[in-house]
Image (cartoon, rainbow, N blue to C red):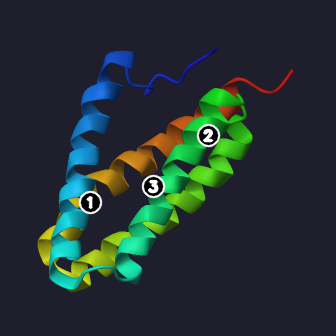
Amino acid sequence: MQKPAFNPPNWVFPPVWTVLYVLMAFSAWRVWKRDGLTAAIVLWVVQLLFNAAWMWLFFGLHRPEAGLVEILILLVLIVMLTYVFWRRDRLAGILLVPYVAWVAYAALVNYALWQLNPAA
């Protein structure tokens, strides 16, 4: 598979995702502790499901074009989540900013991989 020059090395993914999942969990915990089960927490769960779906589409099914559509939806969900969390607890919203940035970057990498490796 051809990779773009800005594709990160494989060793970067485990530590980055570990930090992001810790930040997501802590952020959700802060909102849960403050408000309990609300639409904000439901949105958090929904974006987690979309996060998992992207991995399945991109890595499991080897469908970068479907992964691209899905990751763009995921990015919108994360931006919405960041805004909703920010309005309830500023720190909870701030903690999601690295996640927004990483998924935006991942969407760009996904697009480049799709373009560099057209379906046979």
Left or right of 88 on screen, residue 101? right
The structure residue drawn at horizontal position 64% and vertical position 46%, both measured from the top left corner, is 68
- Give the answer, above or below, for where 20 lies relative to 64: below
Residue at the outermost right position: 120
Label located before the other in sequence (2 or 3): 3
- Give the answer, above or below, for where 90 lies relative to 15: below
The structure residue drawn at horizontal position 21% and vertical position 47%, both measured from the top left corner, is 22
Q: Secondary structure at mark 3?
A: helix
Label located before the other in sequence (1 or 2): 1
Left or right of 76 on screen, residue 10? left
The structure residue drawn at horizontal position 73% and vertical position 34%, both measured from the top left corner, is 63
Please name the amino acid that badge 3 sits on: Leu
- Please state, as top left, top right, bottom left or bottom right, where the N terminus lies in the image: top right
Residues under labels 3 and 1: Cα distance? 15 Å
CB-based contact (under 8 Å), mark 1 and mark 2: no
Q: Which residue is mark 3?
A: 48
- What's the mark number on residue 45? none
- Give the answer, above or below, for where 13 lies relative to 80: above
The structure residue drawn at horizontal position 28% and vertical position 46%, both measured from the top left corner, is 21
In the image, 36 versus 67, the foreground residue is: 36
Q: Secondary structure at mark 1?
A: helix
Residues under labels 2 and 3: Cα distance? 21 Å
Q: Nearer the viewer, mark 3 or mark 1?
A: 3
Left or right of 59 on screen, residue 101? left
- What's the mark number on residue 111? 2
Residue 13 in picture, x, y percent from top left: 35, 27
- Please state, as top left, top right, bottom left or bottom right, where the C terminus lies in the image: top right
Q: Nearer the viewer, mark 2 or mark 3?
A: 3
Please name the amino acid that badge 2 sits on: Tyr
Q: Quadrant of residue 84?
A: bottom left
